[in-house]
Amino acid sequence: MKKIGITCYPTVGGSGVIATELGILMAEQGHEIHFITSSLPFRLNQVHPNIYYHEVELNHYPVFQYPPFDLALANKMAEVIDQEQLDILHVHYAMPHAICAILAKDIAKRDVKIVTTLHGTDITVLGIDHSLKKMIRHGIEQSDAVTAVSNSLVKQTHEVVGASKDIQVIYNFVNEADYIKNNDTSIREQYGINPNDKVIIHISNFRKVKRVQDVIATFRQIQEKMNAKLLLVGDGPEYSEMHQLVEKMGLAENVLFLGKQKNVGDLLSISDLKLLMSEKESFGLVLLEAMSCEVPCIGTNIGGIPEVIEHNETGFIVELGDIDQASAYAIDLLQNDSLLKQFSVNALKHARNVFYSQDIVQQYIDLYDQLMTNS
Ligand code: GMT
């Protein structure tokens, strides 16, 4: 049994989901898990005797122009390392979590091992910011082990941040119990979707990098050839602009803006195809969620997306912004029932073979074992 600290962004987002699910699965295997975060991770909605939550508290002294959250986090990490006798502190996101963990290790008395998992925007967005780059490199180089969620992200980390460190790829996973196709057709009826409508789905945080406008433009071409509905799930900075775009294109009747949703598995279960047209995406956890619910995907040739979608087997890869190609692939697939069925079967098989949760968790446990035996 190991004692493992986990720090992540507790709000909605793929990295927080992975960190929390990893903690839950490791707790189920008998390891003791200590979450050290600013608030309760949103997926941590169950009681488990092996899971503890340590909240980072911040006092607002008038002398501070900006409350020093990162230092309070490092202090809390150091406290938990010593009090709980942690073996491993696993942080998700280099900035600021890896830096805080290294500072905490300096402060603490115990020789804890720091594992940093890179998820994407810490490298692809923050890593190109010169005011942060050296700090990110330091966080990576001083960690005892670093993992990234795709080969593409490893390559980008070396290119962008110039870190001289071995980085191990450990792919993302989903909790298969939550992402499983159900045959509840009543949800289609509740949303006014006709039995012969094809359903296309996009799930994201509506940031610019997700290029939701390309999803809408692809859908416009699809619905010219068949009865179809587009489900847009999530919320974020581009939400109202996308609303206006849908109105302007005259698509409002067939595009459903559903906002943030908790039981995404239910929406995937009524979907025929998933679109992810991002310009930055280190993995694309939503693709794996879709595949696990037997939904084929079309995604861009960007970041880790081609490592998740098998072109012409579980979906299709298109060049960034190539709406014509995306809609041509979608129309061919959606008009051919036997091909669509084959792609759905392939998607589930690929999700289970390559990204099976227990296998991925074991890769993290093996890494912890290596670090602990080498010390
Ligand atoms: O995609 C986002 O905007 C959220 C971001 C996050 O911090 O959770 O997602 C990143 O980590 C996910 C989990 O590893 C990956 O699946 C996403 O591809 C990655 N996002 C980007 O690289 C833009």
Image (tube, rainbow, N blue to C red):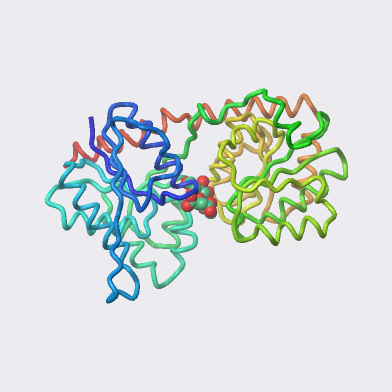
Please determine whether, in this image, residue 1 is positioned above or below residue 202. above
- Quarter of the image where one finds residue 247: bottom right
Q: Position of residue 145 (x, y in %)?
A: 30, 47
Using the image as rendered, state which of residue 233 and residue 302 is in the foreground: 233
**x%, y% of residue 204?**
60, 49
The reply, left or right, for residue 338 in relation to residue 240 is: right
Q: Residue at x 71, y 43 (%)?
A: 231
Q: Which is more toward the observer, 106 or 256? A: 256
Whether residue 152 appears in this view of the structure is: no
Quarter holding residue 168: top left
How many numbered discs? Answer: 0
The residue most toward the right is 225
- Is 271 situated left or right of 13 in this image? right
User: Visible in this render: residue 92?
Assistant: yes
Q: Nearer the viewer, residue 361 or 65?
A: 65
Check the image and report above or below for 117 versus 156.
above
Residue at 44 percent across and 58 percent down: it is 122
Residue 349, placed above or below residue 327: above
In this rendering, position of residue 283 left or right of residue 170? right
Q: Residue at x 39, y 37 (%)?
A: 22
Residue that appears at 64% across and 34% down? 268
Q: Locate the C terminus and report the quarter of the image it occupies.
A: top left
Residue farthest toward the left in the current orientation of the protein: 109
